[in-house]
Image (cartoon, grey):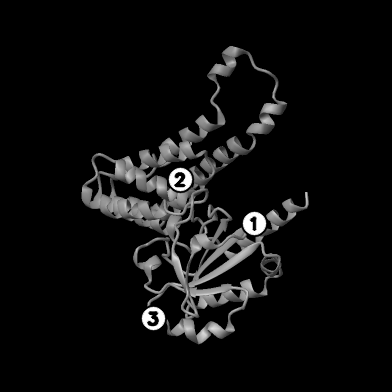
Amino acid sequence: MKPITRSLRAFRKSSLVLVLCCLFSCQQTKQSAPELSDNKSSTQQSPIEKARQVLVHYWDTVALTDSMVATHPEVGEQVFADYVLLLRNVPPEVAQEGLRQFVDKLVPSDKVFLFYKGLFDKYLYDPNSPYRQEELYEAFLQAVIDQPQLGDLYKIGPRELISLVRRNKPGTLATDFSYTLSNGNTKRLYGLTTEFVLVYFNNPDCHECAVVTEKLQASPRIRKYLTAGRLSLLSLYTDEDLAAYWSTLDSRPGNWINAYDDKAVVKNQSLYDLKAIPALYLLDKEKKVLLKDVTFEALEQYLMVMENKQYL
């Protein structure tokens, strides 16, 4: 296995360098290169075409029909990690084409297909993955669904998941829902009228939720937006057992909307993709999704940019 691993690593490195150089030096090349004749220009590949060729041939050195080789940790997952990096650095249409071709290569072996499907789930969809990117994951799911030779049994999960992934995407209108306040009054998300709405799905018993809650409470920027009336922070408890909600209610800031989902509709009907909590969604006044399930740090960065734009 060692010679195979060495050659794969060398191929991965050269592929990464080629694609990244093609994409990031394109503009500089256009500005500094001398003008070429029409004949010479027609024979040169564009950076996008070069990236496409790298993706097309990326798996040529991996025997995907040999399950022992293709699913070996030193071959399969290591090569896959760099493949994802390539996908993240090419135009969406090139990535989609590459994913379709890759799925086609996986079809002959059920074991190989399931192995790499698991890697796509782990790298692109797991909320704790540094590679996470739902746009690429959606493209992978679509490629699986569209693959004509793949059995329907393998498409059941992807069909359910793609519907969830496409829900509440940035740029789309958020799904409306009702929430109940501690006094028993029921209101709706779309009734909030501030410039921004931060929906914070959480459970006080969750350790990571406690960490994010502390960050939100301590953030001068969040506090500034709340005080100025530019932001509504809707903290929604989504589980059926309300004991944790009531036991921590007094410790929550009074300028938050501390609510619960009375019948756990959001969770039970999958109105939002709550595969893990906490989950932060930032909406604009019209309830268009600006940020979907982002980290606290990404939220802070976005609000800082918006704050700076206000003073330009």
* Residue denoted by label 1: 302
Instruction: Say what amino acid the circle numbered 2 marks.
Output: Ser
- Tell me if residue 68 can be seen: no
> Which residue is outermost to the bottom?
247
Badge 3 element? loop
Instruction: Give 11 or 284, whichever is nearer the viewer.
Output: 284
Reading the chain from its start, which is encountered first: label 3 or label 2?
Answer: 2
Using the image, determine if residue 159 lies above or below residue 247.
Answer: above
Instruction: Say what amino acid the circle numbered 3 marks.
Output: Asp
**Number of other residues with Cα within 10 Å of mark 2, as a class: few under 14, some 14 to 19, many 20 or more:** few
Residue 156 left/right relative to 258: left
* Residue denoted by label 3: 241
Residue 145 left/right relative to 229: left
Badge 1 element? helix
**Of marks 2 and 1, the one in the foreground:** 1
In terms of image quadrants, where is residue 23? top right
- Tell me if residue 220 can be seen: yes
Q: Residue at x 49, y 49 (%)?
A: 172
Instruction: Give 73 or 228, whichever is nearer the viewer.
Output: 228
